[in-house]
Amino acid sequence: MSLIASPFLPARGLRNAHLQSVLSSSPARARYATRKLAEAQASHQTLTLDAGEGIRLQGVLSTPPNPPGDALVLLLHGWEGSAESNYIRAAAARLLQEGHRVFRLNFRDHGGTHHLNPEIFHSGRIAEVVAAASDLVARLKVQRLAVGGWSLGGNFALRLGLASARARLPLQAIAAICPAIDPANTMEAMEAGLPLYLRYFEHKWRRSLARKRALFPARHDFDDAVLKLRMRPLTAYFAEHHTDYGSLENYFDAYSVAGERLAALPVAADILMAADDPVVPVTDFHRIAHLSQLRIELAEHGGHCGFLLDWHMNGYAEKWLAERFAALRPAPHTP
């Protein structure tokens, strides 16, 4: 068991949770990530992966200038994010600068990949992410794998860890930033909090669903009245009509990692969490802090996946992630 206080302390004026959360998605942070990724001088290649049963997932493989070793870092974005999200690109840039090979995976229906699969994304689709990781490992001959995720992507990273032994993935490290632990509690936190976050996710999800319907009209016949539902009834509708779970409660339980579930992790997992996160309740982490496989770093500030150090948009989370994966770095070349 480990729950430690984080040394993260943002600059004066940046200690508001909502400011941290909003600025992480801002144009200023996007410019920072773009610049840092360019400075890494890596090559980038879009790959489409076999995720089993005819399912295809897509992502971006980034390789640093020096030939990489046998290791790979897999990065997983949050819900309605993508491989091009600011936090993903900033983290990839930092990892590339330290010599890591990085793959930024898009979940189904994220990052403009709606056309690849007829069925709709939902958070229970961990099997296809594990299968895609297996295809990636085999294709690139990966001997050492690390996975990092943010928010829902952090939840997927932890569940990938739980499935890694059965899938024979060479997983060495897991790092999750503000991961969703108990989805039911996350929903309640958003409903009780500042409406900004609920509206943000509602808007992006409705747009995604409308695009899916346009691409596969014969498969998806939900009308605009469904798309106008608020978050809870909209989630319930899709849990009941587009999953095998039958109810909202069963759906939430399907991807929850609360209780003792993470005790079965085959490798230790590092978690970075902010006490002032307005989306994922910090109480969920106190409830799992006794688990021996978890090392939880709790910051006083940071918002939801923010962790911005200063007004130049430098981030603590990408530094933290790189430190957790330092053991995977290629050994220095000896003439």
Image (cartoon, helix red, strand yellow):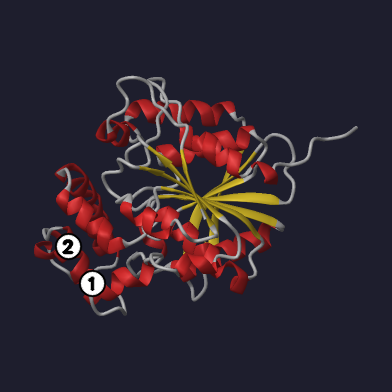
Quarter of the image with the C terminus is top right
Whether residue 135 can be seen here: yes
* Residue occupying image coordinates x 33% and y 36%: 25
Residue picked out by circle 2: 232
Position above or below: 252 against 65: below
Q: Amino acid at mark 1?
A: Leu
Whether residue 206 can be seen here: no
Viewer-closest of 178 and 334: 178
**On the image, which quarter does residue 114 sit in?**
bottom left
Q: How many marks?
A: 2
The disc placed on residue 177 is: none
Q: Amino acid at mark 2?
A: Arg
On screen, residue 291 versus residue 110, left or right, reads right
Distance between mark 1 and mark 2 Cα atoms: 9 Å
Position above or below: 119 against 178: below
Residue 277 screen position, x and y as percent:
31, 43
Q: Return the residue found at the far right.
A: 335
* Residue occupying image coordinates x 39% and y 26%: 10
- Secondary element under disc 1, as helix, strand or loop, is helix
- Secondary element under disc 2, as helix, strand or loop, is helix
Position above or below: 172 against 167: above
Residue 330 screen position, x and y as percent:
74, 42
Residue 163 screen position, x and y as percent:
54, 69
For marks 1 and 2, the one nearer the N-term is: 2
* Residue occupying image coordinates x 23% and y 58%: 187
Residue picked out by circle 1: 248
Density class for disc 1 (Cα within 10 Å; few <14, some 14-19, many ≥20) is: some
Viewer-closest of 323 and 1: 1
Residue 251 screen position, x and y as percent:
30, 72
**On the image, which quarter does residue 269 sit in?**
bottom right
Disc 1 to disc 2: CB gap under 8 Å: yes
Viewer-closest of 222 and 33: 33
